[in-house]
Image: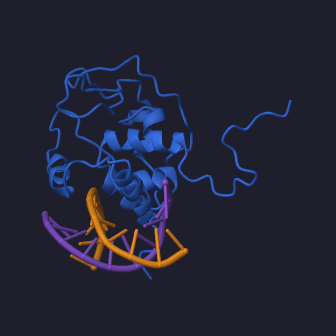
Chain colours: A blue, B orange, C purple
DNA sequence: CCCTGATTCGC
DNA sequence: GCGAATCAGG
């Protein structure tokens, strides 16, 4: 009974936006990542991410106005936040990162509040800041890292900004 | 200059 | 529907 492949074309050359991609897109978007970061993480261009987001009617309400504001507000606490963007830039400049390419399972069972954060706790934000259920990952962060293995992979992307910007 | 997100427009 | 090109703001 060769009755299979409900939505598969005879030649799937370009597996563009599939459900998984869209889910990742949404998750990263809600996580507060910028379109560039999302694009780098998923593996598509920035415009593709933005275009898809717009098509899905998923926008942060405005332009980079509110977003810039959020990013300006640094969570001053005993443990300073991790400058993801700077890290990526430096990593790009230095040409290499010591970030291990290991993907760990993200455990959602150890979530904690901001006050519960420690040096060995993952500081990956869950939900949107200010939300009622806003908290942090709270998993074990090895080697003094700020994130657990699963989230560090998402946080420290050795993003090589080799995108062809215009011509 | 860099960055960002949003829209337009050809495919 | 897709995304590069383009626009517009910071």
Q: Position of residue B3 (x, y in %)?
A: 30, 64
| Number of on-image labels | 0
Q: Is residue A72 above or below residue A132?
A: below
Identity of the residue furthest to the top in this view: A109
Quadrant in the picture for residue A81: top left
Q: Position of residue B9 (x, y in %)?
A: 38, 76
Q: Residue at x 37, y 61 (%)?
A: A89
Quarter of the rendering occupied by the C terminus of chain A: bottom left
Q: Position of residue A56 (x, y in %)?
A: 37, 48
Q: Residue at x 20, y 57 (%)?
A: A63
- Residue A75 is left or right of residue A7, and the answer is left
Quarter of the rendering occupied by the N terminus of chain A: top right
Q: Nearer the viewer, residue A121 or A48?
A: A48
Q: Is residue A121 above or below residue A147?
A: above
Q: Nearer the viewer, residue A97 or A84?
A: A84
Q: Residue at x 22, y 40 (%)?
A: A80
Q: Residue at x 41, y 61 (%)?
A: A46
Q: Position of residue A11 (x, y in %)?
A: 74, 55
Q: Is residue A65 visible?
A: yes
Quadrant in the picture for residue A76: top left
Q: Nearer the viewer, residue A62 or A29?
A: A62
- Residue A113 is left or right of residue A108, and the answer is left
């Amino acid at each position: 009974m060769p009755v299979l492949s409900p939505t598969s074309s005879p030649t799937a050359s370009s597996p563009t936006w599939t459900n998984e991609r869209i889910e990742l897109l949404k998750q990263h978007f809600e996580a507060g990542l910028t379109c560039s970061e999302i694009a780098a993480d998923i593996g598509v261009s920035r415009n593709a991410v933005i275009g898809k987001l717009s098509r899905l009617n998923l926008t942060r309400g405005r332009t980079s106005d509110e977003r810039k504001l959020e990013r300006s507000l640094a969570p001053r606490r005993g443990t300073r936040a991790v400058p993801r963007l700077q890290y990526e830039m430096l990593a790009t400049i230095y040409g290499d990162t010591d970030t291990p390419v290991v993907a760990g399972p993200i455990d959602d069972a150890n979530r904690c509040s901001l006050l519960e954060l420690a040096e060995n706790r993952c500081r990956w934000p869950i939900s949107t800041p200010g939300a009622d259920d806003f908290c942090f990952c709270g998993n074990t962060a090895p080697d003094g890292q700020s994130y657990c293995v699963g989230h560090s992979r998402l946080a420290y992307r050795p993003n090589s900004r080799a995108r062809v910007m215009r011509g």
